[in-house]
Amino acid sequence: MSKPLPEITIKAVVLGVLLSMILAGANAYLGLFAGMTASASIPAAVISMGVLSLFKKHNILEDNIVQTAASAGESLAAGVIFTIPALLLMGYWETFNYLEIAKIAGVGGLIGVLFTIPLRRALIIEAKLTYPEGIATAAVLKAGHAKSGAAEDEVQGGLRLLSLASIAAALMKLGQQGFSLWHSAIEGATHLSRSVFGFGMDLSPALISVGYIVGRNISILVFAGGLISWLVAIPIYTAIHGFQGNPMDAANAIWDTEIRYLGVGAMVIGGIWSLIKLFKPLMLGIQASLRAYSTMQDGEVMKREENDIPIKYVGIALLVLMIPVFMIYNDILPTPELAFLITIIMMIFGFFFSAVAAYMAGVVGSSNNPISGVTVATVLFASLLLLAILGSGSLQGAAAAIMVGAVVCNAAAIGGDNLQDLKTGHLVGATPWKQQVMQIIGVLSAAIVLGLVLDILHTAYTIGSPTLSAPQATLMKAVAEGVFQGNLPWNMVIMGAIIGVIIIALDIRQERIGSDFRIPILAVAVGIYLPISLTTPIFIGGMLAHIGNKMGATDATRKKGLLLAAGMITGEAIMGILVAVPIFITADKYWWPNYGGFGWLGPILIVAIAVWFLTTLKGDKTQLGEN
């Protein structure tokens, strides 16, 4: 019997922690800017193979451990930035509380890891869900460790492409954000009679890359949601109510105060539909998993590849974690009894939505996981419950609803990521409990730095401003405040819910006829509440992926395209943070010099990025992964 390969080694842990922190910061910027995040598993795997190849001894399981920790940081960032900035936006916090953010993120992330440990056997082994990003990451790891001289060249080639893309996107961000050489977006509006029509496009390589990663289907739906807001709802609204001032300013104001609430209604319906649709398979999966654990004989030696953290320790850890959760809510709410009630409700929501996220990641992947939809539903339910108990006008009640959503959102974000990584481990022969330990390490590493990242970005760009709009956090704040202040535009929420029901009906039809073009409601809802300037480049990125496929892209060139996109996202996001650092240190928003006058350069560079994607997809079929 061969000796198992080492997995949790010092070099793997150190690299995993560093990548978790770096990718958490990068994804935090991307999510606050774009309202969407992207999985970091494949770039983390490539970086790990490149770095660990410098050591005399390293193996595929070490690289898997590194990507497990790194992707945990990236996923936790999504849970944090979708919710916690709302506490600042509503005025409950005056500044970002680093310790409180670390506590909320860490506790929520750990709950997500623990809740999904019993689901590994049910969803990966018995249900055999796809987990597309987990399969893709395993394929990259296996290709990088193939016993041939070409394998090392492929890894190094992928690392070079990732690095080059990061540098290119970082330089573009420095030119635009740091030196103001060109405007960040092209946008404008016009009106026909009383109807205003607005349109725009952000000149962002990261947004094009997000569109490339999510693909043609999702990017079309996100863009369609934007069109519903900007080319249908706003023109109808202004035709009825009129507008004042500049058409673009009027369109932005109407979208912000009225139209985006269509997205709230659609997302709530989407979150509820996700629960309804997945309730039965989830319950069957959980029962199967519990049966497997209960039939194990005491002292039975399990296969290494089937060895999870024991279920009794999972249960004990969850009971212990209820203490810090209770303390979080007890600091906000007026009575310990109410804090305890909210703790129990949060744990129930956390379990169901972690399970939903874990199941959905197996179907559509982590990048398309609907955690924002289920979080909006959670915040709305918590707000209505607390309104009934505390009465209207309670800032503490609105903040507590956001806190419930924050812990649930972090748990759901990690839940989907955990199963995606465990699928990769299952395919490469990893030990589950070691991956689960590294998931915990990745969560705690990212939780430490996210408060500082948020503070740096807020000082430089002001979270909630057009520069860093934080769409989900702004939405969570609007929902919680709207419930307690009684000014939530329920007419728009209800109309959005009706739109959501129509889209769900259309998707059911698509499923029945066997169409490969599905219409997931939450993709459309995201587009409704994103500015049109963000949905346009996402659509272009999805079309680039589609055109590349029509040009005959191979699995190898698609991997190259994915690394190009990941590099673009990482480079732009990290430079966005680095540009903010001197502003944070000096407290001078005008620290960077303004050179201006190069407005033509931004569009030209975006066209060059698009051409780069297409030439990469058409590239040499023998590179990066084809053996």
Image (cartoon, rainbow, N blue to C red):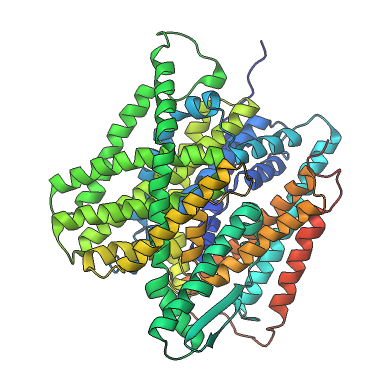
**Point 56% across, 43% down: residue:** 511
Quadrant of image for the N terminus = top right
Tell me the residue at 35%/43% (across/down).
107
Q: Is residue 48 left or right of residue 470?
A: right
- Residue 129 position by quadrant: top right
What is the x, y in percent for residue 72? 51, 44
Position of 487 with respect to 224 (left or right) is: left
Q: Nearer the viewer, residue 546 or 101?
A: 546
Question: In the image, residue 562 lies at what x, y percent?
Answer: 69, 51
Judge whether 143 appears above or below 261 on screen. above
Pick the residue in front: 477 or 16: 477
Residue 163, by quadrant, is bottom right
Q: Who is closer to the viewer here, 459 or 604?
A: 604
Q: At x 54% / y 28%, what residue is drawn?
A: 124
Quadrant, the C terminus: top right
Total marks shown come to 0
Instruction: Reply above or below: 207 against 162.
Output: below
Residue 171 position in % (x across, y down): 68, 69
Residue 543 visible, this orientation:
yes
Furthest-bottom residue in view?
Answer: 245
Q: Is residue 457 above or below residue 114?
A: below
Is any atom of residue 9 visible in this view? Answer: no
Tell me where residue 279 appears, x and y as whole percent.
40, 35
